[in-house]
């Protein structure tokens, strides 16, 4: 059976945190080890630069951090191809070709981009590269002819836009050159982990994250100061477990469902204090994070080897992207000298 091609990616703007872990990393490792897919995992540094052009240092530093986090959680470069977007110039050329078949109005309608423009407070100063990043993301996906893209819900508009570009391209140039990708949404009930402050999302800019590489004492401190049910003032008060980050984390990370259910009942009845729940959550997290942190420390000992892994992965990916680009140029009819 032919293996389906998967492509996923992350912008390297910092270390990866628990939100990335439950929302995608864990699933990537599972998909990788299933043997059913050929996986490409892209560190999208070029996309990260679209709103960090004046701070390339941040992106350069984050690149190696993200690579270490990947290796630490069990992404295996023998089974998955880890690649660096900027090292594959074919992606930039594909983007240029796709830009000609996309309208400005269509890009303006992309809800995720709209939301980001609002959040980042660009006003009238939206970098043009940022504005068109969904088109560059379509290049990322189609270059590898990926048919499956496992992403969070916020990326749905990107995949929809990619599908439109694929259909337009194949129709205009009369050849089935490009492959329409499908989204694979995370199946976990906790696809989006709230921050330790109870805000909807773990986000570096808000500072409510627990990082995969956090030391044990840091994890403990963050857990012990987590937001819980604000109306659960005294131990004997009945508390709420829904929308309570401590229990959401337990659902996402705890393996002993029976104990967790008992704790939930106790908390709802009253008589179970936040400190007890947090201590238990701390144990659960420490047990899961320890092997990840230890593996990371091993890989940190040989950073040149990690760069070499990225270089090899990028070279392998470049061959695939370059073959797709050739087909695209042929379809458009600009391979004049072949
Ligand atoms: N936009 C994605 C994010 O912000 C990162 C990304 C870049 C990506 N290229 C991709 C995701 C291709 C999936 C496929 O997380």
Image: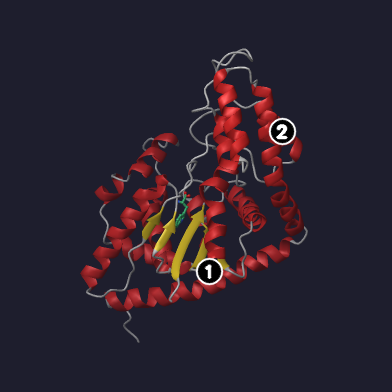
Q: Secondary structure beneath disc 2?
A: helix
Tell which of 117 and 227 is nearer to you.
227
- Residue 220 is tagged as 2
On the rendered structure, is 86 left or right of 285?
A: left
Q: Which mark is residue 35?
A: 1
Give residue 193's position: percent from left, percent from top.
52, 38
Q: Is residue 118 above or below residue 43?
A: above
Q: Classify 11 as above or below 124.
A: below
Crowd rating for badge 2 (residues with CA inside 10 Å; few <14, some 14–19, many 20+): many
Residue ID at (41%, 45%): 154
Q: How is the image coloured?
A: secondary structure
Q: In the image, residue 93 lies at what x, y percent?
A: 40, 67
Q: Position of residue 42 (x, y in %)?
A: 52, 60
- Which of discs 2 and 1 lies nearer the camera? The answer is 1
Q: Residue at x 64, y 54 (%)?
A: 73
Residue behind label 1 places its C-beta within 8 angstroms of ligand 1: no
- What is the quadrant of residue 138 in the picture? bottom left
How far is disc 2 from disc 1 in space, using C-alphas? 36 Å
Q: Earlier in the sequence, mark 2 or mark 1?
A: 1
Q: Quadrant of the N terminus?
A: bottom left
Q: Which residue is rendered at x = 62% and y = 27% of the image?
A: 226
Q: Position of residue 19 (x, y in %)?
A: 55, 42
Q: Would the CB of label 2 be found within 8 Å of ligand 1?
A: no
Is the residue 104 above or below the residue 148 in the image?
above
- Residue at the limit of the structure toward the bottom, as seen here: 338
Quarter of the C terminus within the rendering:
bottom left
| CB within 8 Å, label 2 to label 1 | no
Determine the secondary structure under disc 1: loop
Is residue 84 in sight in this rendering? no
Label count reads 2
Image point 41% across, 40% down: which residue?
116
Q: Is residue 106 among the parts visible in the rendering?
A: yes
């Amino acid at each position: 059976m032919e293996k389906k091609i998967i492509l996923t990616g992350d912008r390297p703007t910092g270390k990866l945190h628990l939100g990335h872990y439950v929302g995608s990393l864990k699933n990537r490792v599972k998909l990788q080890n299933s043997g059913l897919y050929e996986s490409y995992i892209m560190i999208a540094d070029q996309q990260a630069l679209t709103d960090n052009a004046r701070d390339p240092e941040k992106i350069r530093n984050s690149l190696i951090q993200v690579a270490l986090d990947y290796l630490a959680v069990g992404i295996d470069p023998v089974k998955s191809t880890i690649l660096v977007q900027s090292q594959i110039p074919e992606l930039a050329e594909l983007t240029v070709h796709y830009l000609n078949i996309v309208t400005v109005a269509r890009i303006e309608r992309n809800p995720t981009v709209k939301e980001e423009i609002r959040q980042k407070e660009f006003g009238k100063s939206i970098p043009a590269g940022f504005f068109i990043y969904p088109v560059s993301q379509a290049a990322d996906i189609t270059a590898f002819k990926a048919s499956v893209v496992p992403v969070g819900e916020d990326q749905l508009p990107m995949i929809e836009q990619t599908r439109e570009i694929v259909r337009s391209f194949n129709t205009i140039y009369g050849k089935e050159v490009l492959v329409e990708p499908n989204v694979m949404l995370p199946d976990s009930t906790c696809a989006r982990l709230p921050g330790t402050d109870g805000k909807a999302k773990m986000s570096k800019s808000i500072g409510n994250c627990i990082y995969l590489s956090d030391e044990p004492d840091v994890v403990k401190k963050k857990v012990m100061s987590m937001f819980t049910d604000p109306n659960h003032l005294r131990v004997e008060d009945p508390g709420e477990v829904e929308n309570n980050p401590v229990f959401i984390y337990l659902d996402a990370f705890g393996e002993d469902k029976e104990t967790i259910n008992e704790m939930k009942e106790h908390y709802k009845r009253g008589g179970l204090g936040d400190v007890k729940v947090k201590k238990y959550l701390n144990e659960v997290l420490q047990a899961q994070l320890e092997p990840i942190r230890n593996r990371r420390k091993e890989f940190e000992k040989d950073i040149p080897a990690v760069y070499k892994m990225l270089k090899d992965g990028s070279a392998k990916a470049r061959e695939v992207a370059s073959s797709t680009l050739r087909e695209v140029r042929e379809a458009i009819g600009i391979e004049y000298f072949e």
